[in-house]
Amino acid sequence: MLKRIKPIWLLSLLSIVYQPVMAHQKVSLSEKDSIKVLAAITYRNNQIVESGEIWQPQGFLVGGEAVPAEDGASLDDAQLQGYMNLNKEYYVAAKLSAHSHSGENSLELENLWFGTEFQFAQQMFQIEAGKISTEVTDTINYHSSIDIFSQAPLSADILFGRHFTDIGARFALMNSIDQLNSSYKLGIELFSGDNFPATSGDGSISAFSHLTFQSQSFQSIAKLWVMYAKAEQREDVRYSEGHSHGVSVDNVVQSFFTGDTLSTGIYLDGTWDYEQWRFHGEFEWIQAQIDGQISTTTQSAYMDAVQSSYRLAAFVEREKHSLHLEYEILSVDNEFSHTTETFIEQVGLSNNGFEPNRLSVGWHYAFHPDFILRTEWMRDESNELSQVSSIVSLGIQWRYNLL
Amino acid sequence: MLFRSLGRLTLPKLSEVDSSLSFMFLPLSLFVMLFVSGCNVSSTTTVTSTETEQDLRTLLDLPDHMPLPAIPEFNPLTKEKITLGRFLFYDKQLSANQTQSCGSCHFQSDAFADGISTPIGSTGHALVRNSQGLSNVAYNATFTWSNDTFFELEDQLNVPIRADDPIELGVTDAELDTVLSRFNNDEKYQEMFEAAFPDSDSGATMNKVIFSLASFVRTMISAKSPYDEYLLGDKEALTAQQKLGFSLFNGEKFECFHCHTGINFTVSYKDANTLNDALLFPFFNNGLYNVNSDGSYPAEDQGLFDLSSDPTDKGKFRPPSLRNIEFTAPYMHDGSIGTLREVVEHYARGGTLTEYGVNAGDGKNSPYKSALILGFSATDEEIDAVVSFLESLSDYDFINNEKFSNPHEEN
């Protein structure tokens, strides 16, 4: 339980420190052409679920690309990012990504989008369209080669199927408030619905507000967002499409979700630079309100659920070394009608008293300008109560600017 | 530990940071503290039901793990109709010549099948289809072996009672008044009809007979087999062989589950929560025949084709529930396969070969055979395991339960 983390004053500390080590691929019209290569390779001594078993935290609907990493060595993620500024009129950016599981590799054009910025009524606006990521929160744009830990946050995996990418458009208002040393970005996004929890063609829409405050050595970001997604006969295809991850589909109870998901999120962070030290802390709360029907080939049930995730993270950095900490806990309040408890258990949605949680600790050593040695220890209790996995991993992050 | 280490670091006093920090720091800190301390991070799952649903469960004596069957609004379930239906089910006065009742072809000991390939009607007509077991028919999406227009038991019951070709109970238009008068002249039936239909004073009618029979048959819920115990958490309720069989049954090699899935082991399923647009009305050609090598079935019964005249419907029949399948031999729509093992062997071969006679042909090569019937190689042990699993669906409580027995034989 979250209440176990004491003393509570730590939360205050966490709220004032931090800044993402490396931003996700966000671009603007002021940048120069660039091509970057990023990769992450990790060796793990253990895995969350045994090979051939399905990872589905009890009580939660899961989908997208939310499959846990396997033990042994794996190419977690490789990316080729490109950005081209066309006469400062507009830009085009793209991301080609690859990852491997159980010896299977997949290559995907994850993002390809166009954008431009313009001033209107003394306000700065940005328009982007194409296959884009969401900007509501970076947490759901997870990639091992960019993020702190080698495995995605539980909240990203469970609530959004890991990394968000979809055909869509974004319209944002950006400005700064010099008197308050602040800047803000307000935006809306419209997506086709290819990304979990939506289904293709049924769409999702989001609105976000980001506020950044900077004062001397302190910086803080606050984000507030909401996203509505609609799904029609959504299936959990994690183990049946593209790659099976060693799981036999015979073991999957095939169920479908039809309904709406309203997600809300609050993100707060703070980063404080002091001499050679940097302190960072962040807190994130995401809640998904789910209203719909869950069905199998024969039976069905009405579902009214609230899934909540809480994530606390912090790091301390000095020169080439940094120490990272992250704790996550999720809870679900599921209510079903027109069904039986047995059916709910069969589709994996029964959960009384189990809160998936994970504690991760990592040490990063940037031993070369292009390389970071990443060591981690993770205590995971996300699949079912008392099924605790302790995972030690060692890996490399590589980032190189080709252009 | 890590937090303690952090605490030992020499941090500057907050006052040393730009005073404008309070712009973000104080409200954010307060917010986080209040938010987190006010959160109740605990998971719960509840399954709610209305009072009406609970009453219906009680009336049906429905085990908790069974979904609520769909009861048509035009025939709400009552205890009185169930009682009347039970008496009528076993009463030979319901046939024109008073030689047969529903119970003549639906024996409780056989899970309400009759143990023979095809039955004989009350006037001696040979019927062409095997008597189906009645376990859990309340969950059927459609009724009879092959009719995509019978959505309710009330539709189906007209056939055995009223049809004249072939005759089963033989209550044709000419015999209707005679049959109904038997019940109208019986004091006990008068009371039961009045109790079952208190808003009507018209005495016995065929609609009332059918509505009562449908109500009784809907109570025939079978859910106390070893499989049910296993489903409810008793992992020892199935033997190791049955567990292997269950795994094979649900695997892509045997493919049984594609047609025999869910709580009632058939994809032809509906319950009280099934939306109309989600209803499936599946009918399959399983390769039992391939007469003249053109996909035909024996002329006397070509399945859905006899209603639709669409050649691709030749040999299409509804996949029955496998509940109590051990008790309902012989199998298939015409009772042409005698044992469960032979049924599994039929599917393993990918169809049945009829070597001689007017129906000669290899069902394996039928052009209309379901794409799910591909055939597979299986060891004797695997077939035995699947058969053993099917036997775990046997519910001895169901075939011995007095509430389904013949009330006319009670002391």
Image: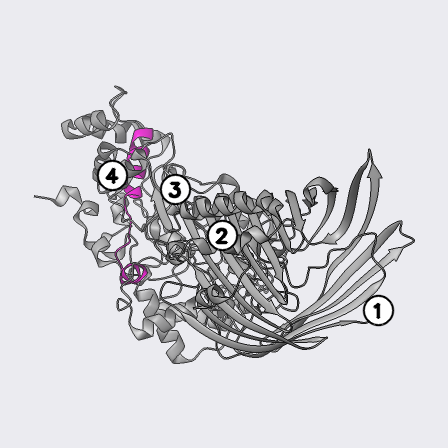
The residue shown at (60%, 77%) is: A395
Q: CA distance from mark 3 to mark 2?
A: 41 Å
Q: Are the residues at dot 1 and dot 2 in contact (C-beta closer than 8 Å)?
A: no
Reading the image, the residue beneath label 4 is B59
First in sequence, mark 1 or 2: give its number.
Answer: 2
Reading the image, the residue beneath label 1 is A403
The secondary structure that dominates the magenta segment is: helix
Which amino acid, by three-letter code, is at mark 4? Leu
Q: CA distance from mark 1 to mark 2?
A: 41 Å
Which amino acid, by three-letter code, is at mark 2? Ser
| Pair 2/4: label in front | 2
Reading the image, the residue beneath label 3 is A337
- Where disc 1 sits, the SS reads loop
| Pair 3/2: label in front | 2
Task: Give the letter of the chain under mark 1.
Answer: A
Percent x, y of residue B181 = 24, 27
> Please, is residue B70 above or below residue B399 in the view?
above
Q: Residue furthest right?
A: A87
Quadrant containing the C terminus of chain A is: bottom right
First in sequence, mark 3 or 2: give its number.
Answer: 2
- Span colored in magenta: B207-231
